[in-house]
Amino acid sequence: MTNVEIGIIGGSGLYELAGITDTQEVELSTPWGAPSDKYLAGTLGGRRVVFLARHGRGHRLSPSELNFRANIYGMKKLGVERIISLSAVGSLKEEHAPGQFVIPDQFYDHTKHRQSTFFGEGLVAHVSFAHPVCGQLLDLLKTSCDAAKVEAKRGGTYICMEGPQFSSLAESNLYRSWGMDVIGMTNATEAKLAREAEICYVSVSMVTDFDCWHPAHDAVSVEDIIRVLHQNAANAARVVTEAVTRMPKDRACKCGSALAHALITDRAKIPPAIKEKLGILVAKYL
């Protein structure tokens, strides 16, 4: 199963993709082991898409347990050129209320134990990451949210923490003082790997609650959060359908050539085993 156009990654509360038809489960192996779950390939809005439950169906994997490299490599192996990432996040600003979506254009990586590159072992690459989100997809997702009548902000900064524990009050207030907009545990790692894989990436950050800085945080119940998760899942399905339907055939961005000037290792010094391992990513440059 190859040549799928668009990849969708579902986070907490999103373990399936509403509206997808003509489905086929695809089980892949990668040089980094198994992805989070089987990929679900099918048709949505007249386009070929593939869906992956980030934490596995049944939410079996914590953020620090995720095999990010396998997940993104699997997308590349299937032919994906664009990824729409859907994630539950906490809000660090009063203006981002539960039920609203934020489409961040920046990430701050505050993780500590992640493997966030495909490179090493004899092949070094330094990709540009100043603008970690595809600008074309940013505009498309904001337009799609508007069309789906889902309140969304274009732009902002997503701080990616290690987890699985939520923030302490001191941490939450610090992140607010830095000007962060939302907090999650996965997207910065995905975005880095997607850039190395030359895949366009955009995050749809779905606010479920205010982080612990908020005075009313202790009044939020598990039932409240579950209710918002269900609401966000329904809204996400509409937004994704709009985005897939409106997705241009051609990429008007530089994401597809991110490695063109990134490989710094002398070609004669690259171990053959690494050339083979990273062939899907680098063969066209070697």
Image (cartoon, helix red, strand yellow):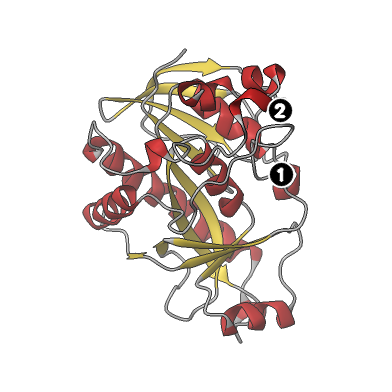
> Circles 2 and 1: CB distance less than 8 Å?
yes
Q: Is residue 155 above or below residue 244?
A: below
Residue 176 horizontal/vertical position (percent): 58, 81
Residue 43: name its quadrant. top left
Residue 15, x across and y down, in percent: 55, 38
User: Height in image: 161 above or below 32?
Assistant: below
Residue 185 seen from this side: yes
> Which amino acid type is shown beneath numbered disc 1?
Gln
Q: Would you name the residue on which mark 1 appears?
A: 115
In the image, residue 135 lies at what x, y percent? 32, 53
Query: In the rendered image, which quarter is residue 45 located in?
Result: top left
Dot 2: few (<14), some (14–19), or many (≥20) neighbours within 10 Å? some
| Residue 89's disc number | none
3D distance between C-alphas at marks 2 and 1: 11 Å
Which residue is located at x 56 percent, y 34 percent? 72
Q: Is residue 209 left or right of residue 273?
A: left
> In the rendered image of this protein, does residue 273 appear above or below residue 96?
above
Element on which disc 2 rests: loop
Residue located at (53% from left, 22% from top): 280
Give the mark count: 2
Is residue 62 shown left or right of residue 143? right
Q: Nearer the viewer, residue 173 or 283?
A: 283
- The answer to whether residue 56 is visible is no
Indicate the amino acid at tag 2.
Trp
The 10 Å Cα crowd at callout 1, few under 14, some 14 to 19, many 20 or more, is: some
At 64% from the left edge and 39% from the top edge, which residue is drawn?
124
Residue corresponding to mark 2: 32
Q: Is residue 111 left or right of residue 98?
A: right
